[in-house]
Image (spheres, rainbow, N blue to C red):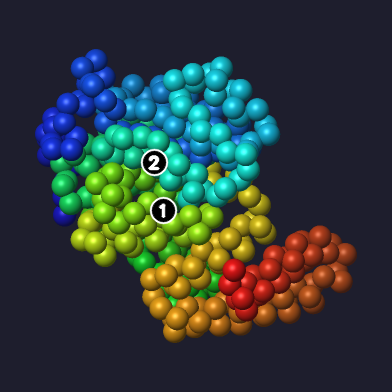
Amino acid sequence: MTSLENPMPTSLPGLADHDTPSTAAAPACAVVLVCWNNKAYLEPCLASLYGAGLRHPFEVVVVDNGSTDGSQEMLRERFPSARLIQNDSNVGLGRASNQGIEATTAPCVLLLNNDTLVNRESLEALIDFMIATPNAGAVGGKLLNEDGSVQAEYSNFSTLREEFLIATRIGELLWPGYPSHHPSDEVRAVGWLSSACLLVRRAALSQVGLLDDSYFIYGDEADLQYRLVAAGWKVYYVPRATTLHFGGRSMDRWRRRKMVYRGKMLFYRKNYGAVREYLLRGLFGALTVAKVGAWSVAWPIPSMQDRAARELRSNIDVLRLCLRLD
């Protein structure tokens, strides 16, 4: 285990001369945010970032995926130092994040969701830990809900047993927050962490490659960290670092379901081979058929019709995906 109580060095190769904004020749960290019609959350997120008073110099790149809610105008008026990369349409989270990464040169990159609020102590803890730990390919901490409760910490890489427990919600009934592990107060090497607030070493990205944009959204962060671990890098969980994450603000639960399942199946296809991929698709397909049956029974009930119609459409989309992953 590694402790954050130990004093951090002021510089290391690859992250040298970035300790104070007044003397820095270049930013120590590039913060990359992707936005799609989420101005109401992007504005306070950036305000928390710029207001944190970090001693490490940083730059901010916002990649906009064709927003029509005035996000671009807000950025120019409120945060003129943030660099804007404008896409004509929603190209997905992974591809847009890669655009931001490629537009910067800082030795570490903070992937940050636009529906978060950050603080100085936590961001500096992540950067300091990255500086002090040469084998750290990625570093993250706790995600908190609005009320301060723990939303997520860290997860193991997926197994078929785990996916069964998630899909049936048995895991959540047995262990709150499943499959995320919590609570934990120790710094440790883990499987993967959410990219809602994830610091990644650029040298590690240069070795294993950027996010796989075939995911579009969901699954890309686990895939990246799987490749990091396979290449010998460590992914570290630093509990002292906390980020408030509102979560799920760009997509409703019914549309999100298909994208989450798609990400899981793509991860299995890429990293676990055809046998486990088809076992996963069979598992999801069987459970989805059961859900379709249950919501079909509920649909004639007047008070349930609206919810049942949404659930049926969503689960039928998942079933099609299980039969033919696009």
Q: Is residue 65 left or right of residue 222?
A: right
- The three-letter code of the residue at mark 1 reads Leu
Q: Are marks 1 and 2 in contact (CB under 8 Å)?
A: yes
The C terminus: image quadrant? bottom right
For disc 2, the neighbor class at 10 Å (few under 14, some 14 to 19, many from 20) is: many
Q: Nearer the viewer, residue 113 or 152?
A: 113
Left or right: 123, with 148 as reference point: left
Q: How many marks?
A: 2
Out of 188 and 173, give the one closest to the viewer: 188
Measured from the top left, where is residue 64 in percent x and y? 56, 36
Determine which of the numbered discs, if any, sits on residue 13 in the image.
none
Residue 161 seen in the current view? no
Q: Which residue is mark 2?
A: 101
Residue 158: percent from the left, percent from the top?
Answer: 40, 69
Helix or strand or loop: what does disc 1 sit on? loop
Instruction: Please indicate whether residue 75 sits to the left or right of residue 51 in the image.
Output: right
Element carrying mark 2: helix
Quarter of the picture holding the N terminus? bottom left
Q: Which residue is mark 1?
A: 211
Q: Is residue 6 above or below residue 135?
A: above
Residue at 21 percent of width and 17 percent of height: 23
Which of these two is toward me, 161 or 186? 161
Residue at 57% x, 76% y is: 284
Give the residue displayed 54% in from the left and 55% down from the top. 216
